[in-house]
């Protein structure tokens, strides 16, 4: 028996002197030379913990292999997602998803090929009964590029929620704005 497997070609088999030609649209055939999709992976999520009762929250997901059309999945349901770049996504979580304490599984799905990242837990935490000193806990924000959509979320530790964010001095680059929930979004028009 003589067989060969080629994508979209005729598969020929010769058995006992009888030739048979079949057209089979075969994908892969175990050929390591054919490319396979690479699943997205998450390196970190900001914020990883959200206070229960928060009205809405923008989540920033940083990782690798995010496609031009990707979605952040919140317990398997797609969030409205902005692709910042191939390593950064931003997704909006509605307050109804933050109403009760829970541990949520967050994933990234590339919509073209359906590949999904491994789930990463995000905690919707009950409000603490003790308050500590309020401090910004965002160590750094992803870099921005001129004329490229940007999204980042500030996070805070301590104090008593709900929190309201505002700019008390200075200003953001033209094209960016800060929401009262701590999301910096927009498209910077200058360096």
Image: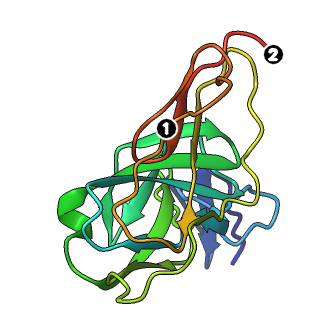
> Residue 127's x, y, as percent?
33, 81
Residue 27 image point, x, y percent = 57, 59
Which of the 4 image quarters holds residue 63? bottom right
Tell me the distance, in whole angstroms, between the alpha carbons under discs 1 and 2: 22 Å
* Above or below 21: residue 42: below
Coordinates of residue 38 in the picture (x, y in percent):
68, 61
Which residue reaches farthest bottom? 129
Q: Which residue is mark 2?
A: 191
Which residue is found at the position 66% from the left and 68% from the top? 44
Residue at left 80%, top 67%?
A: 32
Residue drawn at (51%, 46%) of the image: 90
Q: Is residue 189 left or right of residue 32?
A: left
Q: Nearer the viewer, residue 50 or 20?
A: 50
The image quarter in which residue 17 lies: bottom right
Circle 1 SS class: loop
Q: Secondary structure at mark 2?
A: loop
How many numbered marks have been drawn onto this rendered protein structure? 2
Query: Where is residue 55 drawn, in percent x and y?
Result: 26, 55
The quadrant of the rendering that contains the N terminus is bottom right
Quadrant, the C terminus? top right
Count residues near mark 1 (Cα–Cα under 10 Å), then give few for <14, some for 14-19, many for 20+.
few
Tell me the tag on residue 166.
1
The residue mark sitting in front, 1 or 2, is: 1
Does residue 3 appear anywhere in the picture?
Answer: yes
> Is 139 situated left or right of 8 in this image?
right
- Between 6 and 95, the residue placed more toward the observer is 95
């Amino acid at each position: 028996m003589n067989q060969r497997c080629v994508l979209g070609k005729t598969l020929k088999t010769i058995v006992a002197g009888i030739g048979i030609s079949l057209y089979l649209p075969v994908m892969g055939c175990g050929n390591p030379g054919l490319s396979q999709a690479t699943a997205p992976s998450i390196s970190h999520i900001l914020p990883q913990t959200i206070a229960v009762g928060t009205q809405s929250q923008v989540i920033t997901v940083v990782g690798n292999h995010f496609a031009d059309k990707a979605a952040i999945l919140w317990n398997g349901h797609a969030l409205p997602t902005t692709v910042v770049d191939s390593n950064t996504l931003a997704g909006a979580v509605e307050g109804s998803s933050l109403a009760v304490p829970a541990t949520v599984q967050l994933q990234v799905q590339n919509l073209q090929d359906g590949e999904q990242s491994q789930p990463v837990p995000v905690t919707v935490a009950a409000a603490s009964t003790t308050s500590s000193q309020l401090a910004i806990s965002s160590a750094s924000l992803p870099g921005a590029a001129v004329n490229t959509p940007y999204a980042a979320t500030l996070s805070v530790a301590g104090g008593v929620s709900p929190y309201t964010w505002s700019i008390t001095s200075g200003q953001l680059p033209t094209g960016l704005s800060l929401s009262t929930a701590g999301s910096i979004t927009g498209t910077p028009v200058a360096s």
